[in-house]
Amino acid sequence: MHLLQLQSQAFIDLTRRLLTNLGISVEVYKESLRKISELNLLRVLS
């Protein structure tokens, strides 16, 4: 589980850098992260 968390954090960091480089607003980024989190929760619970 810990390895999965590290991989997820690395993915989030990479995504944040890519979005910043593309000039995407923080609000859009936060909304996207919220949706990803919801999907992960649904996947874990199912």
Image (cartoon, grey):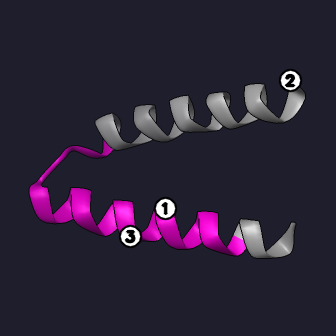
Q: CA distance from mark 1 to mark 3?
A: 5 Å
Label ID, residue 32? none
Disc 3 + disc 2, Cβ < 8 Å:
no
Residue 21 lies, with reference to residue 40, above or below; the image says below
Residue behind mark 3: 14
Q: Earlier in the sequence, mark 1 or mark 2?
A: 1
Report x, y in % for residue 39. Answer: 63, 29
Q: Which corner quadrant holds the C terminus?
A: top right
- Secondary structure of the residue carrying tag 3 is helix
x then y, percent, for residue 36: 55, 37
Q: Name the secondary structure under disc 2.
A: loop
Tell me the quarter of the picture where residue 5 sits.
bottom right
Secondary structure mainly formed by the magenta segment:
helix
Q: CA distance from mark 1 to mark 2?
A: 23 Å
Residue at position x 77%, y 76% from top? 3
Q: Indicate the amino acid at tag 3.
A: Leu
Residue at left offset 29%, top offset 69% = 17
The earlier-in-sequence mark between 3 and 2 is 3
- For the magenta stretch, what is the residue range? 6-26
Q: Residues within 10 Å of mark 3 (few under 14, many from 20)?
A: few
